[in-house]
Image (cartoon, rainbow, N blue to C red):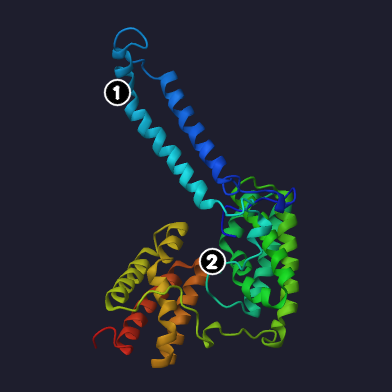
Amino acid sequence: MDALHAYHGAPAAMISFHIGGASTASIIVSVFLIFFLIFAVSFAFGRMPEGGRRLSAAWVGAWFRASVPRLIVAGVFAGALGLAAILLGNNSGAPVTAGSACRQPVIPLTGLPVTNARLVGAIAGMERIAEAAAGGDTGEARTLFFSLDAHSVTHDIDRQLRAADDKLAYDLCLNVIVLETQMATTLDLEVIEREANAIAQQLTSARGVLDFSATASPGQVEDPCSQPIGAATNGPLTANRLQAAIGSMRNFAGDAPDVGQLELRAEFLGDAHNITHDIDGPLRQADEQLAVDLCHAVLVIERELSLSFNRQVIAENATLAADLLEEAGRALGILKQ
């Protein structure tokens, strides 16, 4: 659901990835035609070779020498396209559609648990996006989509929702694909308003299906760090990896006051962030309170990067997370005392 999805104004399930839906034979023919056209166009606009009359041995030799770099460029381009087409293709030859993409569980974006408070915030966020679109504010609608937690929740809730109501999860996925595609391409405000409102309604239905109200009473926020969080990777917890993560987290804290928002978000989504998830399970067995404290520090960073973007809070918690990672390494015997 993250990118490269079909737009279903038509409906969605009818729009396909044309390369991914191609057969092996059509890929080979297409690559050959592209190779030939690139080569032909390069000669149509390039310098004609010298070497005697046309089609003589000297002319052909000069023609071949001049063609070598063009052959290489055309071959590399066509070969890369052919490889991409084969990798994106599927054995049945059927096109990859929004409908087929939504038949499988969606990968979570944050790894955070979807709590009642988080889901309520996501519903409100989608309603704000719909309101911005209804008011004709393209920039505000796009900014809200990429900054609020509402988009992340639609990914993070998918697996949990499928277990309770597979059709609702499937329909939610389809609508999110349309909204994502609009934000990345045409920005049709009427479609954005419609899809954001539909997603808000589906998330409201999901809240009822999952019965969050039974586990979190009004005014009470469930602590997502009270339970172990899932690992982000299968990477080993080595001293080198942990020391590198600690250094990266400290650099991130130093960059927080000055670096642009998009760049700072991208910087955070590296192994320094991943290891805070990977270390959680083993750390809870050695020092549960330390694991909870680390989880809270990282959770604050993730929320600030998605919501209010308070740079001072981000920097303070990144420094705290680095200190806690260092302490965690010693508690687990990964780093020396």
Q: Nearer the viewer, residue 233 or 95?
A: 95
* Relative vertical location of residue 275 with respect to residue 63 in this rendering, above or below: below
Identify the residue at image location x=51%, y=32%: 33
Q: Where residue 70 sits: x, y (%)?
A: 37, 28
Residue 293 lies left or right of residue 190; in this view the side is left
Q: Where residue 231 sits: x, y (%)?
A: 46, 77
Q: Which residue is mark 1?
A: 65
Q: Nearer the viewer, residue 30 or 201?
A: 30
Identify the residue at image location x=44%, y=70%: 314
Identify the residue at image location x=73%, y=69%: 168
Q: Amino acid at mark 2?
A: Ser
* Relative vertical location of residue 108 with respect to residue 142 in this rendering, above or below: below
Quadrant of the image containing the C terminus: bottom left
Quadrant of the image containing the N terminus: bottom right
Q: In this rendering, which labeled residue sits more in front, label 2 or label 1?
A: 1
Question: How many C-alpha atoms fall within 10 Å of the one at disc 2: few (<14), some, or many (≥20)?
Answer: some
The secondary element bearing badge 1 is classed as helix
Question: How many C-alpha atoms fall within 10 Å of the one at disc 1: few (<14), some, or many (≥20)?
Answer: few
* Relative vertical location of residue 137 with respect to residue 231 in this rendering, above or below: above
Instruction: Say which quarter of the image contains residue 219.
Output: bottom right
* Numbered mark located on residue 281 in the image: none
Residue 150 lies left or right of residue 46; in this view the side is right
Q: Where residue 322 sits: x, y (%)?
A: 35, 77
Do the CB atoms of the residues marked 2 and 1 lie less than 8 Å apart? no
Q: Nearer the viewer, residue 243 or 45?
A: 45
Residue 287 seen in the current view: no
C-alpha distance separating marks 2 and 1: 56 Å
Q: Amino acid at mark 1?
A: Arg
Residue 143 seen in the current view: yes
Q: Which residue is mark 2?
A: 306
